Amino acid sequence: MKHLRSLTAIAEVARCGSVRRAAERLALTPSALTRQIQDIEYELGTPIFERLAQGMRLNAAGELLVRHIRDRAADLDRVRSQIADLSGVRRGHVALACAQAFITRIVPEAVETYRAQFPQVAFTVQVRDHAQAVAALTAFEADLALVLQPPPAAELHVLHAGGQSVCALMRADHPLVEPSAGSGGPVRLRDCLAHPLALPDRSLAIRHHIEQALARRGVEMRATVESGSLEFLRAMVLREGLVSFQVASGIPDDPRLRSRPVDARDLDPMSVVLAQLRGRLLPVAAAKFADQLAARLDRPAEAR
């Protein structure tokens, strides 16, 4: 374990890009941490960092070593979780990278249900969109990622795949909610575009999804307000009567809000993916939570 602590210190220097900052996080002196780096380099027979004026950067040998360190740390977490299972006490930690669309209901409900069974399991939930969530997996910052339309990535191992319709979101007194508009039923995208819009910005997958559909028709849309925060967009819908777009699972139960799915002729459902890093053996707690979350995602939206 002592040797693993030295290796973990190497990974922290790589993450911080600085011996001084890593030493502060590890409660070590910079000189002690530098000696650990030198000892590892002596054992390997090669430098693992490039010493730069602005800090430390891994070289090719260092990249290989840090990937090995993260693999071993993940394996140790899994063994610790299995040992806890042997004693009949379920412990552990689950790190989830999750799109904003799932933090309103799906993930909090899933975590609550899981912790009711295993109260000694801790959770870290990072809000990350599609590309950022994949990066969190590859950096071993997350065990699992739950995202909308992640980019193609060979390092992803998909545990669950499904789909969700994009919904137009508006205030309860908005014209699109009038009985003549078929409140609750599908709405045409062109009818939504006739109103001032509160749009997700281009950091979010839903914006790209809508723009691609409109580009095929040669149609442009203009934002009155745009943001990377879905919560902010919902606030602007309520304050100014704008129309926004969110997937069904991200819309809270709020009597002031109404939503209608965008007609499938205008907009395909978005893919929902629960994934882990390919080739990684998950800790027991994360693997069990993944099974539960996948089963929850299989439930029809109206049953949630």
Image: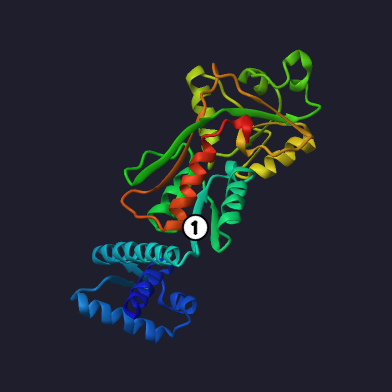
Say if residue 204 shows up in the picture.
Answer: yes
Q: Residues within 10 Å of mark 1 (few under 14, many from 20)?
A: many
Residue 165, given in percent of the width and then of the height, sits at 56, 28
Residue 54 seen in this snapshot: no
Q: Quadrant of residue 116?
A: bottom right
Q: Is residue 176 above or below residue 231?
A: above
> Residue 53: percent from the left, percent from the top?
37, 73
**Picture quadrant where residue 54 is located:** bottom left
Secondary structure state at the residue bearing disc 1: strand
152 to the left or right of 296 = left
Q: Residue at x 58, y 61 (%)?
A: 119
Residue annotated with mark 1: 94
Q: For the C terminus, give its image quadrant.
A: top right
Would residue 10 be found to the left or right of residue 227 on screen? Answer: left
* Residue 45 percent location from the top left of the image: 18, 76
Q: Nearer the viewer, residue 46 or 113?
A: 113
Q: Residue at x 66, y 37 (%)?
A: 251
Q: Quadrant of the N terminus?
A: bottom left
- What residue do we see at 43% from left, 69% from top? 16
